[in-house]
Amino acid sequence: MIFEHTELASPVGNLSIAASGGRLVALCFEGIWDERVRSLERRFPGSRFHTAKDPAGVVTRLSAYFGGDLDALTPIEVEMWGTPFRRACGTSYAAFLPVRRDRTVRLRARSVSPMRCARSERPTARTRSRSSCRATA
């Protein structure tokens, strides 16, 4: 897999940004990028990273957001891989993407039924209790 990478000096510190296929795949604070690269390389052996000015337009969108346009982040397409268990259980961060910026959502509101977890690809999911299938962050 080919990843485009850049860094952005922002009001919250230096950010490392990576995109692939026009979608954001990583956004890291300073000091975490090397760990993220290792994680992506484990998930996608043979990955290559190329420097780009504005991967998937994220630099432009973040700059607008930090400039005061609170809706600038909405159009960013995000790739949320997650583990097969997290995808089946609905506990990946993708569950939070539809939440509007002017809303507050309790994590319990994003929980799923235990039966959905039981159908996941992880064999031990059938033994999980109701509370362990709830989204926690």
Image (cartoon, rainbow, N blue to C red):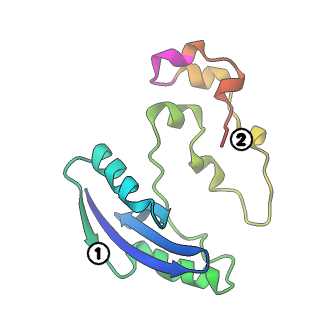
Question: Which quarter of the rendered picture does the N terminus lie within?
Answer: bottom left
Name the residue type under label 2. Answer: Arg
Residue contact at pointers 1 and 2, CB within 8 angstroms: no
x, y percent for residue 88: 53, 32
Q: Which residue is mark 2?
A: 110
x, y percent for residue 58: 48, 74
Q: Quadrant of residue 99?
A: bottom right
Count of marks placed on residues: 2
Q: Whole-Å distance between the Cαs marked 1 and 2?
A: 36 Å
Q: Residues within 10 Å of mark 2 (few under 14, many from 20)?
A: some
Nearest to N terminus: mark 1 or mark 2: 1
Q: Which residue is mark 1?
A: 51
Name the residue type under label 1. Answer: Thr
**SS for callout 1:** strand
**Residue drawn at (71%, 41%) of the image:** 110
Question: Is 66 drawn above or below residue 47 in the view shown?
Answer: below
